[in-house]
Amino acid sequence: MLRNAGNFGPRGGISGRMMKGKQSGINHQSGEITKITDNSLVIKNSDNKEINLAILDDTSIYTKDGSIASISDLKTGIKINVFGRPNSAGVVQAKIIKIQ
């Protein structure tokens, strides 16, 4: 199985290389932020489904141009892409958040 091991480029795209190995189980979600707390977000996707996200100590947050950002840069109403794995309760444990 191949998976991408890469980073965000200067224009916000993902760059990287394909690697052989076990699939990581990380999935992609995108939507508009509707609620923010100290360590969690709720986004609404294009199907109007609410998705709960947990922000962990190792969550990486990036701006539209690929620069490093922080949770203080996240505001209700902005759109984001999220890469993470859902826990047993269905909350997505965010590994990467990219502001659109």
Image (cartoon, rainbow, N blue to C red):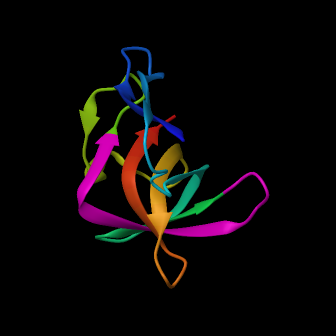
Q: Residue furthest left?
A: 57
Is residue 96 shown above or below 54?
A: above
Write down the quadrant of residue 5 in the picture.
Answer: top left
The N terminus, quarter of image: top right
Is residue 12 shown above or below 97?
A: above
Asked if residue 85 is among those painted magenta in the image, a careful observer would answer no
Asked if residue 56 is among those painted magenta in the image, a careful observer would answer yes
Write down the quadrant of residue 84 in the picture.
Answer: bottom left
* Count of labels in the image: 0
Front position in the image: 55 or 14: 14
Most common secondary structure along the magenta stretch: strand
Is residue 71 shown above or below 65?
A: below
Report the magenta residues as a range.
Answer: 45-61
- Residue 75 appears at what percent x and percent y? 42, 52
* For residue 35, side relative to residue 58 (left or right): right
- Residue 17 appears at what percent x and percent y? 41, 23
Taking the spot 76% from the left edge, 62% from the top edge, the residue there is 48
Taking the spot 72% from the left edge, 66% from the top edge, the residue there is 49
- Residue 86 appears at what percent x and percent y? 50, 70
Front position in the image: 66 or 78: 66
Q: Residue furthest top?
A: 10
Taking the spot 28% from the left edge, 46% from the top edge, the residue there is 60
